Image (tube, rainbow, N blue to C red):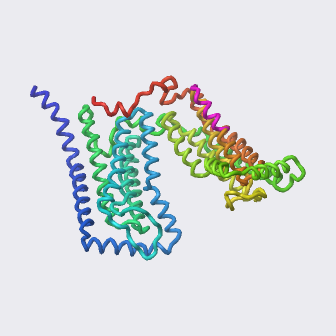
Amino acid sequence: MGAVRDVLRRPLGHFTERTLAGLALVLGAGVGFGLLLTLVRVRWPPLYDVDHGVAQWLNDQVAPIGPLVTVLNAITDLGGRAVIVWLVTVAVVGLLIRRQGRLAVFLIVTGAGALILDPSLKTLVDRLRPEVDVPIGAYAGQSFPSGHALGSMVAYGALLLVFLPAMAPRWRRPAMALVAAVVFLIGFTRVALGVHFLSDVIGAWLLGAAWLGLTAYAFRLWRLERGRPAVPLTDGLEPEAGHDVAPAPDEEKLLPHARAGVAEIIVGWVLVFGALYGFGMFVSYHADNTFLARLDEVVPTWFAERRTDFLDELSWWWSKVGDTHAILLISLVFCPLVLAIWRRWRPVLFVALTMFGELTLFLASAAAVDRPRPPVENLDGPMPTSSFPSGHIAATLCLWVAIAVIVFVRTDRWWRWVFVALAVVMPVGVAISRMYRGMHHPTDFMGAILLTTLWIGLLYWVVRPNEDVRQGNQPAIESEDVDTLDDELARAGRPG
């Protein structure tokens, strides 16, 4: 029995030696936050003077420079709840697909803790936001601690710990430096934009470091209890999961002939633009007394005569399906899922090039053709681009057709036909709503179809997004296992 106890003590002692310094840092961060919280609550004069002085000085430097304000707002959005929730959610879903339930639970618990701590502490402290001479932005709620600074510290730090094992050792320190820089810049923008005091940001960093360290320490204790070796945090939380958490570990080369592919895409883009320009100029200025001209005249008028309040509202919502935010959101959900399930970058490249090409072709064609909107009331008011082709319809077509192209050949389940249906229903619905609202002619819809057909056809020929399926690649979730996939969250919560 004595020998057994000695064997059990060794890993515990090894673990304690390795984590003593880290635990001291965590406790130090917690004590530092508690001290700062007390000083804020009692309105300690020296801290008050520093906070207000820094806030006013930065406001004087930043407010007059419009481009700098734009850059600062873009950086601060990286710490916003929308971005943080998206990153953590996508990571959790990907980890569950890769059967890494413990890491998924770590992200959920760590992120949920930050979401709870931020509003509760703000309510407790009830500190007003800074008042500066030239307000740059208006933000509701209390000031201490900074939610952006806390969320970025916790979320980016947790994601770094989870995905470090997927990186080569030489890239780990640069990755840590990059995350630290992002967290620092987000915190700096909160002070520079005049929406938080310096102590709000520092307090958030201390609290975030303490909470992240506590959850990471608990995860390492779990490893020890299951007989796994204690490892430095510079190797990540779960070094054994390096292959599974890597986005595309089984892909050696993205494209076999990258230079030729780039040249083909550039030449193809020019040819597609030429086809769009030719068709757009014809239907806009040279199609008088043709069927297309009569169609463009009759359809918008027919819709305008049948407008109702209900249809106005319905068309507005359906039109939103094709706007930039909706398209971007769907893309940012679909692409990580492709990586998690099929472990290949090429389908993601196909979607990214599809949407980038659609955007550039639409903007170039709209500027070159410069077609007026239909001669009926435009319910969406003046638009920054011209009528041909429809950007909403083209974006919806390109996105859902690209998704259908990827999904249909990668599964034999019945639901692959759902994506085919969506590739038809979604753009048709957007097209009807845009024409109903008087924003586009029927031939603008035809232009979107022409753009989608030519551009996706070109990319499919060049990128070959489903080449890995032809070579025998299987998804992380086999088709016959879809209905019986284990609940990894439930499994992760069970002892043993």
Q: Quadrant of the C terminus?
A: top left
Left or right of residue 308, residue 220 in this image: left
- Residue at the right extreme, as displayed: 289
Q: Position of residue 13 (x, y in %)?
A: 17, 39
Most common SS among magenta residues: helix
- 217 to 190, vertically: above or below: above
Left or right of residue 290, residue 263 in this image: left
Is residue 358 among what the camera can see?
A: no
Residue at the spot 26% in from the left edge and 36% down from the top edge: 222
* Magenta stretch in the rendered image: 412-424
- 13 to 319, vertically: above or below: above
- Residue at the left extreme, as displayed: 2
- Residue at the front extreme, as displayed: 309
Q: Position of residue 8 (x, y in %)?
A: 17, 32
**Image quadrant in which you'd find residue 330:** top right
| Residue in front for this viewpoint, 477 or 470 | 477
Does the segment drawn in magenta span residue 423?
Answer: yes
- 337 to 152, vertically: above or below: above
| Residue in front for this viewpoint, 64 or 140 | 140
**Image quadrant in which you'd find residue 220:** top left
Residue at the spot 52% in from the left edge and 70% down from the top edge: 66
Residue at the spot 37% in from the left edge and 47% down from the top edge: 111
Left or right of residue 364, residue 212 in this image: left
Left or right of residue 17, residue 440 in this image: right
Q: Position of residue 171 (x, y in %)?
A: 40, 47
Is residue 66 among what the camera can see?
A: yes
Does the segment drawn in magenta span residue 80?
Answer: no
- Residue at the top extreme, as displayed: 480
